[in-house]
Image: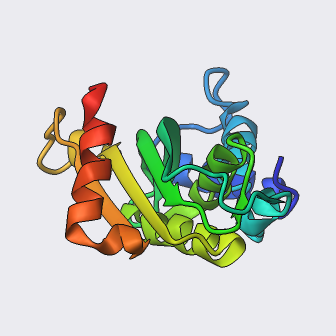
Amino acid sequence: MAENVDRERVAAAVRELLSAIGVDPDSPELAQTPARVAEAYAEFFSGVGQDPAVHLADAVPVGSDTGELVLLRDIALRSVCEHHLLPFRGRAHIAYRPGARVVGLSALPRVVDALAARPQVQERLGEQIAQTIEDALAPEGVLVVLEASHGCVTDRGVQQREALTVTVASRGALANPAERAEVMALIGAAQ
């Protein structure tokens, strides 16, 4: 859990917020809410200050025996939008064309989790994931596709409950439209 989150300050702020909306934070129903929110925020923002590249440090050299593409599809994604502090949830799909090294597949969801566990916007998150993989593995190409439903769109304002936001970040060979199209077809094949 995030040690960088000051739980006491978060709890005090939640107490103030509850008072500001006109409810009694000391009522039996709400007395534990500030502490619960502080614990939730420690989890939601555990990626603040964390270097996501540490999850890719165990990459192994493989030479030319890597195949053409590594694709990990349907990685669960949860983050908090920095605009309204509301959650967004969805899936990440990560593809890379290996260079001389590959990484264990469980490392890719860990990179997603580390970068998503901070106040975020989806557009930046995809770029950060792609850049982390490019910097750590030096692949021939990277493609990151994120699909998410945003609380600020579904639960307030326009209230579009079925709306999904799709963002794409690409590097190297997978920024080429033809190569990117092939990976996009693979991502969509199981859906």
Would residue 34 be found to the left or right of residue 139 on screen?
right
The structure's colour scheme is: rainbow
In the image, 38 versus 186, the foreground residue is 186
Q: Quadrant of the C terminus?
A: top left
Residue, far top: 28
Quarter of the image for residue 91 reads top left
On screen, residue 59 above or below 155? below
Q: Residue 15: x percent and y percent?
A: 64, 49
On screen, residue 68 above or below 159? below
Q: Does any portion of residue 108 appear in the rendered image?
A: yes
Residue, far front: 64
Would residue 14 be found to the left or right of residue 164 on screen?
right
Residue at x-position 31% and y-position 62%: 168
Q: Residue 117: x percent and y percent?
A: 63, 54
Q: Does any portion of residue 9 appear in the rendered image?
A: no
Q: Residue 63: x percent and y percent?
A: 72, 63
On screen, residue 154 above or below 45? above
On screen, residue 155 above or below 168? above
